[in-house]
Image (tube, helix red, strand yellow):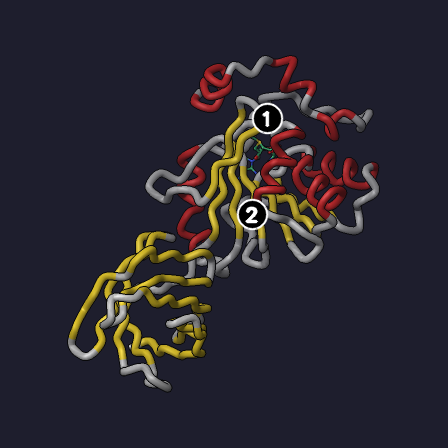
């Protein structure tokens, strides 16, 4: 099975994995078995070290709601609550594992912050999450991708081990030989935007192309088009530079809403507030 092969390739031994089970060793009545089968993927816990790295990379705080899709023994939700003070929800298909994880949360003293739902990650609504964590399989990541991309811009997704193909990560997360990936859900900016005229700035049209968080395009002023320089999109924050008619670089930093860009246009060291509307 791909999942097993992945671990063999990573050189992780049974004993290392068992040692990492951490929160999964406290319940006397039921003990999950490493690699026990699950609905779409077996159970293997993310190591505690990697969990910490993943939640740190996602910059989890007390303001976040963390959802772990396929939450196993609850190590990710419990750590999110204990160490990062977040509210956390685990979605786990296996009823015994879900119950085990909820007990673990109780024993860890974070039952008020951690809820384990016995359910299917392809059925449960996790749209309230500000951070989503996953340790699944490549094909499951890809099945979830369209749903993830509809989440609020700025939502952080962290996956242990497997990527999302052409959706390149914003950051790679490493813990020893383990590797994970962080993505930040990008706002939808593709299309044409009209800058409303303001002091000293002629009307301009911004034309944006987008592939996931990668953006580029042109700015057209007084009939002259020029490429955007260094365009970046991180969540709902869009920034780029362009050259003015005097060949001096000007910069734009904007918050993206559904039909408007609101931000600052900086030239000659002065920032001017601007608005652009979707055409
Ligand atoms: C590799 S384990 C990861 C556990 C945990 N997220 C972690 O990182 O330690 C994957 C988990 O997903 C669960 N699972 C598999 N298919 C599922 C589905 N469709 N819905 C919910 N849970 C599922 C399995 O039972 C297993 O506990």
Q: Residue at x 71, y 46 (%)?
A: 84
Residue linked to disc 2? 132
Q: Quadrant of the C terminus?
A: bottom left
In the image, which is nearer the foreground, mark 1 or mark 2?
2
Mark 1: is the Cβ under 8 angstroms from ligand 1?
Answer: yes
Relative side of 118 to 188, left or right:
right
Residue that lies at the very extreme toward the left in this rendered image: 223
Of mark 1 and mark 2, the one earlier in the sequence is: 1
Instruction: Name the spot of residue 82 as percent of width and height, x first.
Output: 76, 43
Taking 195 as reference, is 41 above or below it?
above
Q: Name the one closer to the observer, 95 or 236.
A: 236
Quadrant location, ligand no. 1: top right
In this view of the protein, can residue 245 be seen by the observer? Answer: yes
Residue linked to disc 1? 44
Taking 150 as reference, is 143 above or below it?
above
Relative side of 239 to 40, left or right:
left
Using the numbered discs, state the Cα–Cα distance from disc 1 to disc 2 in whole angstroms.
18 Å
Do the numbered discs 1 and 2 sit on residues whose CB atoms are within 8 Å?
no
Give the secondary structure at mark 2.
strand
Q: Name the one closer to the observer, 153 or 71.
A: 153
In this view of the protein, can residue 209 be seen by the observer? Answer: no
Instruction: Name the spot of residue 266 as percent of width and height, x first.
Output: 41, 71
Taking 277 as reference, is 84 above or below it?
above
Is the residue marked by circle 2 packed among few (<14), some (14-19), or many (20+) residues within 10 Å? many
How many labels, in total?
Answer: 2
Q: Where, by quadrant of the figure, is residue 2 drawn?
A: top left
């Amino acid at each position: 099975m791909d999942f097993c092969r992945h671990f063999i390739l990573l050189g992780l031994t049974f004993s290392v994995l068992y040692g990492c089970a951490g929160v999964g060793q406290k319940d006397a009545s039921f003990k999950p078995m490493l690699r026990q089968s699950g609905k779409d993927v077996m159970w293997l816990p993310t190591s505690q070290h990697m969990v910490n790295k993943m939640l740190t990379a996602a910059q989890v705080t007390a303001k976040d709601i963390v959802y772990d899709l396929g939450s196993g023994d609850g190590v990710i939700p419990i750590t999110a609550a204990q160490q990062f003070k977040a509210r956390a929800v685990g979605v786990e298909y296996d009823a015994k594992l879900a119950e085990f994880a909820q007990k673990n949360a109780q024993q860890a003293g974070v039952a008020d912050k951690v809820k384990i739902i016995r359910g299917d990650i392809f059925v449960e609504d996790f749209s309230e999450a500000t951070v989503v964590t996953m340790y699944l399989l490549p094909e499951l990541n890809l099945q979830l991708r369209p749903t993830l991309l509809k989440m609020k811009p700025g939502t952080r997704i962290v996956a242990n081990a497997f990527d999302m193909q052409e959706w390149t990560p914003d950051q790679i997360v490493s813990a020893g030989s383990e590797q994970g990936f962080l993505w930040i859900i990008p706002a939808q900016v593709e299309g044409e935007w009209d800058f409303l005229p303001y002091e000293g700035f002629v009307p301009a049209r911004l034309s944006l192309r987008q592939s996931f968080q990668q953006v580029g395009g042109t700015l057209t002023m007084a009939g002259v088009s020029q490429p955007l320089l260094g365009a970046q999109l991180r969540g709902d924050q869009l920034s780029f530079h362009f050259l003015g008619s005097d060949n001096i670089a000007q910069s734009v930093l904007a918050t993206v809403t559904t039909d408007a860009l609101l931000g600052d246009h900086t030239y000659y060291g002065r920032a001017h507030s601007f608005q652009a509307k979707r055409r």
